[in-house]
Image: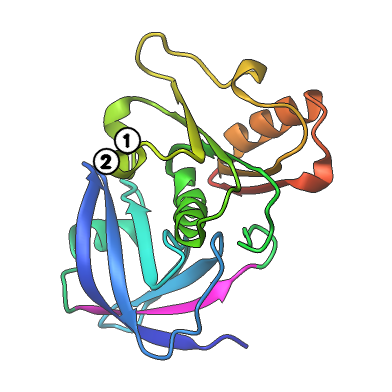
Amino acid sequence: MIRWRRARLTAAREETPTARTLVFEVADWPGHLAGQHVDVRLTAPDGYTAQRSYSLAAPEGVELTVEGLPDGEVSPYLVDELTVGDEIELRGPVGGWFVWRPAVTTPVLLVAGGSGIVPLMAMIRARRLMGGETPFHLVYSLGEPARRYYAAELDTPEPWLTITWVHTRVAPHRRITKDDLPGPGPDVFVCGPTGFVEAAADLLLDLGHDPGQVRTERFGG
């Protein structure tokens, strides 16, 4: 059984007006693969606990990017109240299916909806660390450019990374279509809200992608 560990916040930075990246120091962290996640547990002074899962945003160290949800029980504290030096509990890494392994050199297609970019960014960063020639293509759907996570990093050109932006709330606002997606061949990772993931997966299968090469991770209703 994976045990709970104390995690101390060592740095934080704003990604968007409602999202923040948190960097933690965790003693005896065993390491993880890009795409894995952790469980975070908060305990109130009266003993009440709340627990949520968050994807790891980087291939090394414990870094989470959290979107503050107005009706959330955990995320508002992580985004608005947690300060450097504070401690929380976390457990992980968790998950072994939705992961990218640097030893695999098959081209990679990443399809992100909103905050679903987080585990996919861990894969992009892992690819950058690895070097080599494996091509990556990121299709990133979000409401508007101001809501982008990791904007400065993704705006820096890299020869192995192709990015297709899809904006749903600014002109020319639209949804992902088959024209945004390459045909069969790459390993595919799709992450986002349930409706987005289902729609993207349907497009990929219509294009002829092998279902065994399409890994999905979803959140919300």
Alpha carbons under labels 1 and 2: distance apart: 5 Å
Q: Which image quarter is the N terminus in?
A: bottom right
In the structure shown, which secondary structural element does the residue marked by tag 2 occupy?
Answer: helix
Residues packed near mark 2 inside 10 Å, few (<14), some (14 to 19) or many (20 plus):
few
Residue 7 % position (x, y): 33, 81
As displayed, is residue 87 above or below residue 182? below
Which residue position holds label 2? 152
Residue 1 appears left or right of 31: right
Which is the main secondary structure of the residues drawn in magenta?
strand
Q: Is residue 91 visible?
A: yes
Residue 58 is one of the magenta-drawn residues: no
In the structure shown, which secondary structural element does the residue marked by tag 1 occupy?
Answer: loop
As displayed, is residue 4 above or below residue 171? below
Q: Residue at x 45, y 70 (%)?
A: 51
Q: Which amino acid does label 2 sit on?
A: Ala
Q: Is residue 73 visible?
A: no
Q: Residue at x 56, y 68 (%)?
A: 33
- The reply to whether dot 1 and dot 2 touch (C-beta < 8 Å) is yes
Checking the image for residue 155, the label placed there is: 1
Residue range (magenta) = 86-95
